[in-house]
Amino acid sequence: MRRNFPKEFDFIPKTYFASDWSRFKCDRKKAKKSALWICKPNSGACGKGIYLIDKNKKPKRRNGYIISEYIANPHLINGYKYDLRVYVLVSSYEPLKIYIYPEGLTRICSSLYSTK
């Protein structure tokens, strides 16, 4: 969607999979000095295995990890980072059938947000 509608989907950070390693290295070279990326294991939970890299740290290619641009200025609630989750089930593509669970989930951090 981001490729087809870049203006409408500019809020989504660029994300790289192991197969996108050369594209990530190229984009990283062009990035600002203050740019950060977040590396997450694709099979993790509770924040385990997550780490940040900047332009100075040489990244290692790791299978099973996803790298995304880090959003350094996220929307905050009274200084706390949060996320909203909506759960859906796609049971069929043709015809398209999507079920949205009527209740979502909100997670709010217990410490004030800081890039440090």
Image (cartoon, helix red, strand yellow):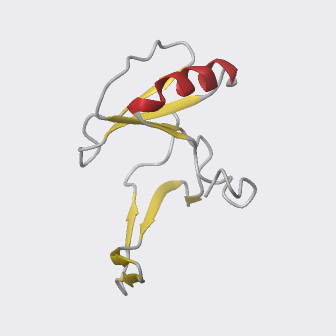
Q: Residue at x 55, y 29 (%)?
A: 36
Position of residue 107 relative to residue 79, above or below, is below
Q: Residue furthest bottom?
A: 102
Question: Compared with residue 58, is residue 70 higher up or lower down, i.e. above or below?
Answer: below
Q: Residue 30: x, y in percent? A: 69, 22
Q: Position of residue 66 (x, y in %)?
A: 39, 37
Q: Reply above or below: 88 against 102.
A: above
Image coordinates for residue 60, horizontal then vertical, percent:
38, 17
The residue that appears at 61% across and 21% down in the rendered structure is 26
114 or 96: nearer the viewer: 96
* Residue placed most toward the observer, 107 or 86: 86
49 relative position to 57: left or right: left
Q: Quadrant of the N terminus?
A: bottom right
Residue in the foreground of this view, choosing between 66 and 81:
66
Residue 71 is left or right of residue 88, and the answer is right
Q: Which residue does the image show at 60% across and 23% down from the upper left?
A: 28
Which residue is pictured at 59% across the width and 52% down the height?
12
> Across the whole image, how many numbered discs are drawn on residues?
0
Extreme-right residue of the structure: 7
Q: How far across and down, in percent of the image, does residue 72 sit?
A: 59, 40
Residue 48 figure quarter: top left
Q: Is residue 94 left or right of residue 48?
A: right
* Residue 15 vertical position relative to residue 51 in the rendered view, above or below: below
